[in-house]
Amino acid sequence: MNRIFSILLMLFTVVVTSQNKQILYGFDNIPQTLLLNPGAKTNYKYHVGVPLLSGISVQANMSGFTIADLFRNDNVDFNTKLDNVLNQLDNNDYIALNTQVEIINAGYQMNDKDYLSVGFYTEVDVFSIIPRDFLELLRDGNAPNLNRSFLFSRFSTKADVLGVLHAGISRKINERFTAGVRLKIYSGSLNVLTNDNQGSFTTRLGTNGIYEHTLSGLDLAGYSSGFYGSDNEFDIEVSDVLSKTFLGPNLGLGIDIGFTYQMDEQTEFSASLLDIGFINYSDLLRNGTVTGDYVFSGIEFQYDGSNPNYWQDLNDDISASVPRSENKESYSVMRPMKFNAALHHYFGKSRREESCSDISYHSYYDNAVGAQLYSVIRPIGPQFAFTGFYQRKFSEKLSSRVTYTVDDFSYTNFGIGISAHIWKVNLYGAVDNIFNLSDIADANSASVQFGINILFK
């Protein structure tokens, strides 16, 4: 029975979803780079994204184990695999999933200095700490864990389904410096949140019974929006979820800022700070709290039938010591703020372009190398990723980028991105962790982005 509960809880954490797009950041003037840095440079008069196809990204990450560790067909007993996974986890392991789908994306060169871009996209973003300690408790029971305190702070999950309506402007301040800002209106459709929980559970040898179980300093809170109807019954309609992503009842505001600085003819530095904002949830709420302390030493069963209500008496006793309550109060959730910084160095002058008079500052160069730092703020603190890359321009119509990324999930993450221009159509695609594509279940991370835009230069 303990193993069944362990499996169910682990699968729950797997189902619930980083946002690092290191291949696309600053790559080949793709319009979507403006969403990663509103101060990116552009070299086209205007662009229009193909609706629903201009920007699609899916990223799934898990630290500590892989799907193959549990389900690989290697004739090893599943219980043994589960034991191995739990033994290799630590308290900082987590699971994250992010998906984005652009509905609309367009931009227009207003004058010699300003480029305006607008759009709307939907996003799913979920983050969950893996509660290793409690999984071990469910697997092993109390006896092997005497005097061990299990901390409820290890329960931390945040999930959002939302839409983002945005408008940004990139301004060329001078020949070296370009800055930009993007305003966002968030519209939350679904949210579940539990974080900053306090308290512990401990089992000791008892004096009145075999064991004494103690709940100490409990202060737990969970929040949800969009999952339950007015009658507190679970009720989700896909049409309602989608409709609320566009200026629905749960609104919030955010801002992106960024810049690009040309240090010299061949070296460029850029940085951005994204999703500085929040969403206020006020629709279809169901929140709950649990507080208090409780010591349980067992039940004295009366075999003569004189106390047939001992289960109800126990429930009443726990409820009195550890009160539970529900409310429908509105609450606000901060967006996971993200930071990007990158250094590009261009080299390899192309002779075929030296006679051209209408080229951008780095179009002379067919190659670039660089590094990027990425960080996102999560409930357990900031998470970091460091990327080195090589970029190659084969022609004016075709460019590629190869990356190597070190993060919480892998030290062997190689990725590749390609951008092609056919007539006025730009097609791009990017894939991470390419050496694990043949066995994606054995990867700690996977990421895919692609899109189609129409560019007018």
Image (cartoon, rainbow, N blue to C red):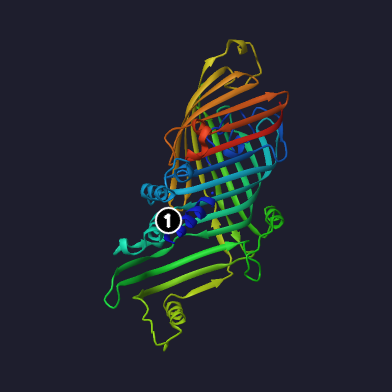
Split into 4 quadrants, where in the image is the N terminus?
bottom left
Residue at 41% x, 69% y is 218
Q: Residues within 10 Å of mark 1 (few under 14, many from 20)?
A: many
Q: Is residue 115 visible?
A: yes
Of helix, strand and loop, which one carries label 1? Answer: loop
Q: Is 432 drawn above or below residue 209 in the view shown?
A: above
Q: Which residue in the protein does label 1 denote?
A: 131
Image coordinates of residue 157 in percent, x first then y, are 50, 56
Image coordinates of residue 153 in percent, x first then y, are 41, 60
Taking depth in this image into account, of 50 and 72 the one nearest to the observer is 72
Image quarter of residue 294: bottom left
Query: What amino acid is at disc 1?
Result: Pro
Q: Tally the numbered discs.
A: 1
Image quarter of residue 132: bottom left
| Left or right of residue 332, residue 85 in this image | left
Q: Is 457 drawn above or below residue 32 in the view shown?
A: above
Q: Is residue 265 visible?
A: no
Q: Is 362 drawn above or below residue 100 in the view shown?
A: above
Residue at 72% x, 55% y is 239
Residue at 46% x, 58% y is 4
Image coordinates of residue 390 in percent, x first then y, are 50, 24
Taking depth in this image into account, of 372 and 356 the one nearest to the observer is 372
